Structures are given as C-alpha cells and as structure tokens.
Amino acid sequence: MIQRFCRRLPPSLRDRLPFIGPGLLLAITVSGESGLAEILLGGAEHGFSLLWVVLAALIFKFAFTTGIARYTVATGEDIFQGLRRIPGPRNWEVAFIMLIYTMEMVAYGGIAAISGIFLCALTGLAVSSDVFALLTLVLVFALLWMDNYSLVERVTVAMAIGLVAGTLISLFSISLPVHEVASGLVPAVHDHMLVEIMALMGAVGGGLNILLYSGWLHRKIGDRHGEANFRRFMAGVNLDLVLAFLLIGVAAIGFLALGWATTTGAAAHEENILTAVWTVLDDIPLATEIFLITGYFTLMGGIIGGVDGRASAIASILRSTTDTRHSEKHLYRGGLLVFAFIIVIAVFFDEPTLLIRSISALASIAFAVTGFILLYLDTHLPSYARGSPLWTVVMAAGSLLFLLMALLKEATILQFGVPLLERIAVVVLVIYLISGSGVLRGMVVRRLTLTDQVWLVLIFGMLSVYGTFRGIEVGGLIVNFRDLGPLIAGIIGGPIVGACAGLIGGAYRYGLGGWTVLPCSLSPVVAGIIAGMLSRRWHGRFTYFRLFGLSVLVEVIHILVLVPLLTGAPLDLVIATARTTLLTMILSNACGLILFQYVVRERGIEGLNGTWIEKDGDKER
C-alpha cells in the first residue's frame, strides 16, 4: 500500500523520500531527551514569554544541522572524523565529546525514571515506577542489541508520528491565550532570566546530540559522496531536516503550552509538574491517557535514538583513533553494555529532572565550541558544498551567543573549573621549564637512578601539595587537583615513585582534617600506583584517550569508592559530594595530563626505552 502511494507521487518528491529518516530520528531523540525536563518546566515558570527563544534556537540549530549534513554528504565521513582535523593536540575534540556522551547516560537514567512514572500512571498497577523504568530499558537495549539501523529508524519514525498527533491533540485541548502567545514572539531579555533562557536554548532542538545526525546520515548514504552525489542528495536531506525541525517545533510549543496550563486553575496548587499536567487534562476525555502514551513513547524514543547514536559515534571514534582489533559492531555492543550499567544506576537517583538539567550545562558549552569548529570545517569544504554568507552569519552569531550564555548559566564551571584550570597552568609551566632545562629529558632517556626517583617524588609530591593548597573549598569539600602530581610521577617513574609522590600530597591533606580526610589522603597514593601500573602494562604508550580514561578511573575510585568505604557516609551525601567535585576534578586532572603530554611531545622527549611518548608518526588515529 505504501509503495503504491509512493509511485503516485511526483518524481521530484519520490526521489527525496529515501532520505527521510535520520532527521526524524533526531527529532524524536531531542524531544524525548529534554522536552519534559526543560521545556515543560519553562512553560510552567514563564508561560509564553520565552517563545522567541524557542524560535531562535530552532533557526540556529537548523543551520547547525544543515552544516553537518553538507559536510557528511560532501566528504563521505561523519562529523566525528571531521573534528579530528582541527589543529592542536590530536583527538582532543572527540575525546571531550566522548566523555560528555558517556556522562549524559546519567541523564538518560533520569529520562528512564520519568518514563517509568508515565507507564506506572498509565497502567494503574501498584508497582514501583522504577520497575517500569527497568522494563523500558530492557526493551530499548534488546532492540539496540540487534544493531539494525533500519529497524531503529522505522520504530522511531512511528514514534515521531505519534508525537505529532499526541501533541496536536493536547494543544487543541487547551485554550491558548492568543495575546500572550503573540507577545512571546517579541524578544525581551532580563538579567534574572538568563539561566532560564539558556536552559531553554539548550533544550529546544538538542545540543551535542545533533552531531548524532551525521552518523545516521552516513549510514544512509554509505560510500556515496562527492559533487555529483551532493547535488542529488541534498534536496532529500533538506526535506528530511525541514520535517524534523517542524516536528521539534510543534513538540516544543506543545510542551510549553502544557507547562503554561499548569499555572491555571486547580493545577496551580500542585507542586509536581507532571501531577499538575494530569490535573489540567483530567477533565478532558482521554486527554490524560493520550498525554501519557505520547509522553512515554517520546521518552522511550529519546532513549533509543540517544543511546544508539552515542554508542555508534563512540564505536566509530575508537575504531578510527585506536589500534583496536575489535570490529565496530563489537565496540558498539560494548558501548551499549557500559551505557546500560550507567543508566540503571542513575534510575535510582532521587531527582531525575535535576539530573537532566545538571548534566546539560557542560554539554551546552561544548556545543557552542563545536559551532565554531563547524565554521572552520566549512571553510575547508569544496566550493560547491560550503555554506552561504547567511549561514555563516547565523552560525557565528548563534555560537557566540550560545557560548556566552552557557558560561553565564554554569556557575560551577565559572566558580571552580576556570580557577582550577588557571592553577593547572602553573603546573604545566613548571613541567615546561623542567623539560626545557634538560632535567626531565635526562630522566626519561636512560634508566632511572635512585637520585632521579627521589627528584621525581619531591617535584611531583610538591605539585600534589600545591593541588590541595590552591584547591577551592566548597561546603567543607576541597575541589582540587592533588592527584595530578602523583599521576605524572607514576607515568614517568612507575608505581613506587607515584605512590611516594602521593604520600607527600596525602600527608599534607591529612593535616587539614575534615570528614573526607582518609579517602582524600589515600587517593593520591592510589592515583600514583594506578598510573605506574598502567604505564608498565602499556609500556609507556599513553595516548590522549588513555590519559583521559586514567583521570576518570582515578577520580571515580576516589569519590565513588574510597569516600563511601572510608567514611561510612550515606548515599545522598556521597551523591552530593560527587555532584560538587567529580566532574570538575576529572576535567582538571585530564586537562593537566593532556597538557603534560603535549608539552613533552613538543619538546621531542621520549622515554621508557623510547616508547613513553607517542611520536607524530605513530598510530593514534
């Protein structure tokens, strides 16, 4: 029946239909990720006064996505391969995005928890919503384990159609205030609303998840690219994107309207936003059921698309940047297992909406930076594939505005992250001076003597002390980079040298006291040992990915293992500690390690029998 209908269409339209799919998959993914967490709350707090933000975000992100599409069709590679062409340390861009994609799985735990609430309310069964959330995850990962893109595409397209239908029905069930809607189209920025504006800009149309579209499009076109294919394909690709962003816009306005409706009548007295929505729809026949069904499948579709896209992206990155013998399919399934573990853990967090909002902050900053990277890549495309001057203006203005507002929104980055990076710059300066003096070169080009080891312990032990001394105290916790010194000592000198450097930093931390004194004093010792053991196992071959993973491993052990084991702190206190310190400390130590490797590489230093630092000719891509 569908094929017969397609044959009746005009040839120009029929030729474009094969490209319908990746955009709709993107639409259901971004709507499921953030609609209920951000847009619904935005409508409840500000009504239609921020409607102009929705439209501005749609314009900018449509331009962003078309730029990605042009790059993919012209070059025949996804955008993640393009990010590796940026000047500077190799693979830093994709490593950063991989970290954020992995962290966002915590937010998917929040999305799964909300989907469980929807399904629990829909069935009316006296079963915990967490059970329904886990059931949803079983269905999602069973589908993704098949690794069948066409099946995933068909399922999510069906969900997208249901999202449009359900949203329109909900809109027609509400009496919209025409005057407020019209006034909301006029831009108005107030200082006290910057956070809300940024949150809504990030929610509408998604953020870094837009990059996933490139992977889906690449699966669609295969190896067909170049000028001839570009001119044939882009008409269908543009149609797909227009439909996708129309769907995203309809869903966003629908969620905004439902949020506004919760501020009127009996719903205004409800504290929970979802309960307030159900109160609004309760008097309308079948409206509540339609909302629950639509909302559930939107959330489920968001999980399907988001997890599939991220697992595929990470598998592609690992396949092309590391010397792995695993196939991309095996890497994809390995990513699914890791993601499943993170999501299941996150389902049992108390505040799912808080999870989604907190993780999005760093991703917003990275998304803005990616906008500038896309502008750079566009200048290196063939002339037939480059964006128009209007596209360039929209991208430049949108990326700059997005970056500024993201920094204003994310107080944690401004208060803790930037000062810590300033302090790490001091550490890097010390390393630079040492490497230039020939002392470090002398240590690593020959077998370490006892004197060399003592110097390593003293230098990097004092850097560990500096990491605590120049840390930032927050609520009795010290956000710091004391593990950085022992990590570097372990990489150069092995586990014993790393542990001894950690003892110096740990002893200083022990003298400061506090309820985390034991785990925080032991952590630099553990960091030095782990770094030294991995250095021996990998024969000193540290790539940027491995350094980043080392930083994540050490800080996860510190915050999520040592703190609960050695303090007996309750789970809520451990979670609060992790929210305050984990992300910033991972990024600070990772930046320090990556900059350390970059400095010594630029100095041309090799070590551990000539294999410590990968040279430019070595395979790292």
Image (tube, helix red, strand yellow):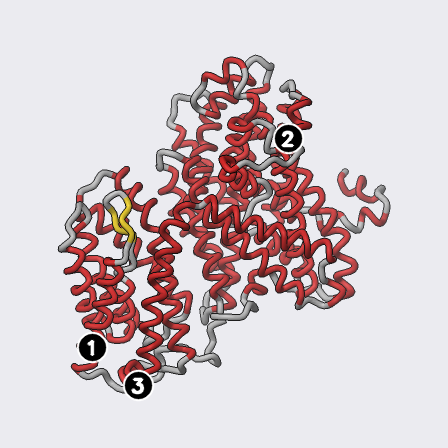
Dividing the picture into quadrants, the one containing residue 52 is: top right
Secondary structure at numbered mark 1: helix
The residue carrying mark 3 is 445
The residue carrying mark 1 is 455
Q: Residue at x 46, y 54 (%)?
A: 333
Task: Give neighbour class at mark 1: few <14, some 14-19, many 20+ (Cα, 10 Å).
Answer: some
What's the distance in space between the residues labelled 2 and 3, CA to CA? 66 Å
Sequence order check: which comes first, mark 1 or mark 3? 3
Secondary structure at numbered mark 3: loop
Q: Mark 2: which amino acid?
A: Gly
Disc on res. 184: 2
The image position of residue 341, as x and y in percent, is 38, 47
Residue closest to the eye, 428 or 292? 428
Q: Mark 3: which amino acid?
A: Val
State left or right for residue 61 relative to residue 238: left
Q: Residue at x 34, y 44 (%)?
A: 579
